[in-house]
Amino acid sequence: MTDSNPPSSPPLGSTRTPSVRPASIRSSHTDTNRSLRSQTSSRTTEETPLIAREDANESDDERQQSNGALPAASSALRSLHDHTKGGRRWPSILALVFLCLVVIVIMALVFFAPAIVKEYAMQATTFEPTSLSIDSFTPTGVRSRIQGDLAMDASRVRKKAVRDLGRFGTWVAKEVESGETDVEVTLPEYGNVVLGTATVPPIKISVRNGHTTHVNFLSDLQPGNVDGIRRIANDWLDGKLGQLRVQGKAKLPLKSGLLRLGDQSVAHSVVLEGDDIPSMPEYDILRLNFHETDLPGTQKGMAADVALRVGNKYPLDFTMPPLGFNILVDGCASSDPYIMLADATTGDVHIEPKEDLYLNVSGIVRGLPEALTQACPGSQESPLDALLGEYIHGKDTTIYVRGSDSSSPDTPKWITDLISGITVPVPFPGHTFGHLIRNFTLANVHFGLPDPFAKPGSPEAQPQISAKIKALVAFAEEMNFNIDIGRVRADADVYYHGKKLGYLDLRKWQRANSTRADVDGLPGLAVEAAIRKAPLQVTDDNIFSEVIQALVFGGKMVYLTVKADVDVEMKTALGEFAVRKIPAEGVVPVKPISGGAIGTFAPKLGNLKILDTGSSSITLQAEVNVTNPTEYSATVPYIDINILNNGTILGHATAKNVKVVPGPNKNILVTAVWDPLTSSGSKGQAVGKEFLSQYISGWNSTITLKTHKGSIPSQPALGKALESMEIVMPTPKLSAPIPGHGDGDGGDDKDMGPHFIEDATMHLFTSTATFTLLSPLKYSTLFITYINATAFYKDDPAGHIDYDLQFAVPPGATTSPRLPADWSLGSVGYDAVKGALGGTLKLSAKAIVGVRIGRFQERVWFVGKGIGARNLTLAPLSSKYSLPTSPIDNEDYAYTPRSSYIQGKSAPTTPGILSRKNSRHRLGGLSRKYACEDDAGYVDAGYAYD
């Protein structure tokens, strides 16, 4: 760039001021004073410095030399011209010699010491850019405007000799002008790859020490090797660019005034490292909005509008043309190619020097590539799962931005070629959506016990829950598009009072229904999904016991906290895809079992069958009716429960594949083993006899059902936790119904209901009696092996039977053989019997009875009331009887009856009955031998008498 200012004016940006010292020493010739004054005035004006000197180190002698050199030469030339015919004047000769020496010094500095001058110029020159702007983009590059301050500072020169000679030479030259030149910028460490070239116009600068020249010029910049630039950019992005050496080369045509200095080859290197290497600018996402958009045809896509603030610390000023980018994400492995996700475009963006840039970017997702949604090898998650999972959990993820080769037509091709090969990793900050899933709860809960035969640790070996999941899904404000939820699954931890009870395995996908709903003023979805047989892994047995006890005995609502990671399969305009591990939390209220009243289960037994017998055991099958007072249902694959009476284990009951629903549950099949001796030893055997005695006497006896550690083989902790829960149930009246004697369900009048001995027929003439017996068994034959019984009228004995011959009592009503009877002559009871001759009479009986069912045998006591004696006939009387001392082992037994039948009081707990006689009474008539075979195939022989 040439200087258009007149010689008397300072150049653009100069800070020099006119000198206050004389320009030259006045001549002593008096005849030329006026002419000299005029010349002196002219010289003073012309030789005033154009650029003010700022170097305080310049001496007064230098200033005097500067102002007086040219006038001295002029005076010498005039003297020679005016006095050619006179003698030579020595002052003029000296001045001419001095001028010649100056010229010789300049020539020596320029032509004979260029290395020194060049070294001085390279070290003393500083350039501070004040503005760098792009005037326009051209088809081959950029036309940029460069503004800055170029200053000469001799103190930067390290060698004193170079510094002194350089100062002198630049003082002599004063200004230097460069011609138009091309500057080539290369990178030596990258094989001297050319970054670019710049065409620099002519520039005139002041080269004296301390002078500053402001420059302002346009330069055409052209990019160099595109592949080399991409390689450097990728190394920078990968963090491999620890330092970078940049070298600039140029051949500068120089001149100083009218003196041409020739072409100077200049090469300068700059090492960039640390903060000198540009870093990725900081940015903030100000706004993010996702919405549906129409694509060509009938397809729909997803659009994303992003507002960004990008930091700018560089003095750049230009308008960036529209650009296109590809948005890519990671594949399954780091070695896999990036997966194309979306296209993004920007509009014209004006960038101002050192001002933050506000940028609007629009992106379109046209579809989800298969590589993005397919599960990775050896994993169940896809790259999309990983991307969304990190984002919704607030973790920073990385997306990759690559220049697109299909930018706007207004974008120069060289820009497209350059950016299309550069991929920039951009950290994308995650966004926590708070409670995206809210009000997570379970309804219609169905509990299932573990399968006892399942492999330990398998889902089938855990308690199972079936229920309906209910949740509200709140959309983030960025999500402005339609969503339907098709399936859900989750892994849920269950807590009680802040302590972890276990976890609920909901890994299987469950179908879901979703409807639009308002969630705290934001659009959302109400989601319902039914889960079936989800395993509940109990991790703390003590906490589980607390929960069970609170449900059974607490009488209050139990609140369980559920914290889950939920996978949601969404249907959007892009298709179906899963968003995994969305955090959810909710409270599941569990109602207590009818306020803690466990008795409301109200189990009842019926339809008893004997399946097998042993020497001390009976295996039975029964149908149970039970009422479930809770709102929860349960499936029981297998459970074993102890049967107790008065705290003593008498046997156990087993149920398989039982489904319990809220309300009445009928005909639940249960198998029980009655074995007091094996379960509790001799004590159990005694308690068992007592229970059976009460049972066949028709008393209101009860049994207790209680779990134990082995109730659920695969979950001993569950059985132990339920030990505190006892179910007490009344023993059903299992008498077989006959016409006119009730239905056998225990619902008849307590005194009029059926008993083991329904009625009796007394034969006074033959001293025998027959009895109508009601078997408590509907499907098996009962054998009576021994009877020692006394009949009472009110509290007075009427007669006695002592009989030890076996006879069978098949199911239903059975008439016994004639049994020999000894009448109590003279007693009130006997008189009552005689008084009822030919009619009926209500009697009571107390007896010890030997009972056999298959291989099982036991002797029990029996107390019966309201036995109807009828068809009384006259017969000789037999011998007397003696009173009993013990119902079981002939020991003394204190009998305190609570009431008699006639008085309407209840029967005694353990009655005293008549003891067995040592002799067998054989009354009149012939005997005949008989044989009876029971259901188990055992044959007993005995005698029957008329």
Image (spheres, rainbow, N blue to C red):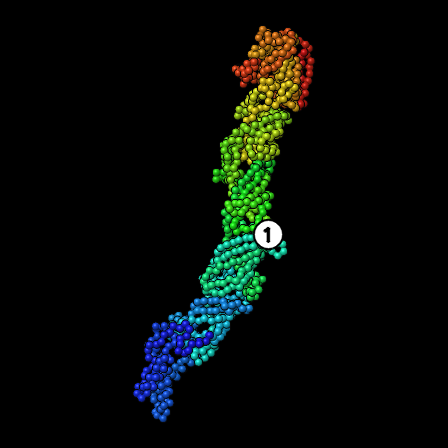
Residue found at x 40% / y 75% = 10
Could you tell me which residue is drawn at 67 percent across and 23 percent down? 935
Percent of width and height locating residue 704? 55, 26
Badge 1 density bin: few <14, some 14–19, many ≥20, Cα 10 Å: some
Using the rendered view, name the quadrant where residue 423 is placed: bottom right
| Residue 863 position within the rendered picture, expressed as x and y whole percent measured from the top left | 58, 17
In this picture, is 206 found above or below 773? below
Above/below status of 911 relative to 74: above
Observer-nearest of 536 and 458? 536
Q: Between 784 and 55, which is closer to the camera in this rendering?
A: 55
- The amino acid marked with disc number 1 is Leu
Res 834 → quadrant: top right
> For residue 301, which quarter of the picture?
bottom right
- Direction from residue 738 to residue 169 in the image, left or right: left
Residue 173 as seen in the image, left or right of residue 728: left
The residue carrying mark 1 is 574
